[in-house]
Amino acid sequence: MAIRGGTQPLTGTEMNRPADPAAARPLLSVRDLSIRAGSLELVRGVSFDLQPGTMTALVGESGSGKSLTAQAILGLLDREVYTVAGADLRFQGGRLGFDGNRLPKGFRGQLTGYVLQDPTSALDPTMTVGRQIAEMFVVHRRMDMRSALKEAAKMLDFVRIPNAASRIGDYPHQFSGGMKQRVLIAMAVALSPRLLIADEPTTALDVTVQAEILALIDDLRVQLDMAVLIITHDFGVVYQCADRVMVMYAGKLVEGGETLQITQNGRHPYTRGLIASIPDLDDLDRPVVAIPGQPPRPESSWIDSCAFHPRCAWKADRCIAEAPAMEQLDGGDIVRCFEWPRVVAGAGP
Amino acid sequence: MTAALEIERLNFAYSSSGLISSGAVALKALDNVSLSVEPGRVLGIVGESGSGKSTLLRTIVGLNRGYSGTIRYRGQTVDHAAGNARMAPFRAGVQMIFQDPGGSLNPFRTIRQTLTAALARAPSAAPERDRLGVLLEQVGMNASALDRRPCEFSGGQLQRLAIARALACDPTVFLCDEPTSALDVSIQAQILDLFAKLKNDGRAFIFVTHNLGVLGQIADTIAVMFRGRVVEVGPARRLIAEPKEAYTAALIAASPRLKHRGVLLENARARLVPRASATGSVL
């Protein structure tokens, strides 16, 4: 198939180039990140940029490699299990290693914050929440505990925990799930990081609490001019909150771009399939359409074909014969699919 | 039509003592709950953590003793204290599907062993030939699964197998407790398709979830629970389009949706969303 007008094969540093050349330098650039565990290739050639002050969503199903990607950036992967290969990571223009030992001092904690899905297991049950937040100031700002606790109380108030000053002496079990997540967020943003990585921060919460936590994260993004990378499997959350979205399947990015474009006019059949499989409260007459089959297991070999082809209604012979490369489109969108023009043209599968 | 399952003024309280509170304090988990579901219909129950959704299902099947009120199965009052001879039709006829897809499958047993044991509880004694194959086909799997164990299947497949296990008892009523919440969305849609098929076969469902969108797809009637009470019940589409209770409206306002971009955060900032918790403590 000929390369279509307006598109070109993607090479290294051109990935996700901002549409406007005068746009700000990306806060974080990830190039060609691959993660292996033994002989298993779990993440392959992931490249993206995060712009300061924006919220980017990383979407995918279980096992697609989205959490591994986040942990690799933070240098949190266990090096006895995982090998990070071929990667170039730049933060504020400076080159970082993916090796946890070679991260600059303060990269975790000061420059980046990390919020996990399960607030209960992320907090130490034997320590008051005040001390857990205060540790950030003691370790990174060399404050004494007394002043650090004062800062901790300010942080609890900052994440809108009522009566913050009186709660710094409380233990995690005295907080509800949503309040515990606020405590974690307070720890993550205590030192005004440039980047917040939130891995399914609301999956364990009720919808009403989820909405509040998402609003809090979005407010903090604005107040601290902080980039947010939110990992989620919920396209509803993406649509409501994120400026940009990246879709991951079987260890590879398959599509990326501006949220409205991706959610309303996605090019990749997997993206479209994910959205079609969500029940739509605003349109109950639209039936949910399941994607048939299931994601490939990491041990299955998909190197020489599109990993999605067994589930894809648009698949052509070529999709089985070779793996599509990532294409860079106008406007900074990316897509990894031979057949996307047919998908976009609305030609039935 | 006789309701497949009917509950009337069901009350249940958990007694808590010791660690959290001094002295015994009764926590009212079900407060005068009355609901019913007909064959071939889906009654959806939505609510937040602690609203009593799961307690309701557990009380119906007899896992919570000491409740007051009446449970009727196909017109007959259920007495959980009765012997197995009298309770057998109820126990086979009301089957639960849990959130954890592997939860109802014994990890040490092959699928064949699990399904065979469940078939033995089915009311019809006449064993069809290849009943196991038919069961697996009904849930979109095939006989190659029979000699494997639960650890060899993905979450979506396990949920299909759990449904096959329940189907083996030829139930009248499925009680589903967040059956798709642990599954990826593309798999969730597959399982919803499967439930719709079983519903068309005339089976009744009580479907508990926190996801209103899922209920909008599958439920005929939705009951909204809040602190142990049913605060609103009505036809699914009407309830979603025109909620009568403020709490229902708040749940809808907090659901992430693919239209009206940004409205979720606006609603949250405007505090349109009240705070709920079973214990009554302010979060």
Image: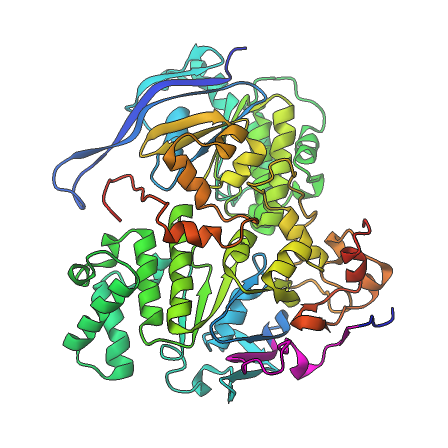
Q: Residue at x 12, y 41 (%)?
A: B22
| Residue B65 falls in image quadrant | top left
**Magenta stretch: dominant SS?**
loop
Q: Please count the marks in the image.
A: 0
> Where is A283 relative to A321, above or below?
above
Judge whether residue A14 is colored magenta. Answer: yes
Q: Residue at x 40, y 25 (%)?
A: B60
Q: Nearer the viewer, residue B109 or B91?
A: B91
State the scheme by which the image is colored.
rainbow
Left or right of A265? Residue A208 is left
- Where the N terminus of chain A falls, by quadrant? bottom right
Q: Where is residue A273? Give x, y as percent.
A: 68, 51
Q: Nearer the viewer, residue B197 or B240?
A: B240
Left or right of B15? Residue A121 is right
> Where is A119 relative to A103, above or below?
above
Judge whether residue A38 is colored magenta. Answer: no
Q: Residue at x 34, y 53 (%)?
A: A178
> What residue occupies the far left of the structure in this picture?
B23
Left or right of B245? Residue A13 is right
Q: Residue at x 19, y 63 (%)?
A: A168
Q: Where is residue A189? Give x, y as percent.
A: 35, 71
**Can residue B76 be spotted in the picture?**
yes
**What segment is highlighted magenta in the picture?**
A6-33
**Can residue B114 be spotted in the picture?**
no
Q: Where is residue B244? Give x, y as percent.
A: 42, 29
Q: Where is residue A128? Give x, y as percent.
A: 21, 63
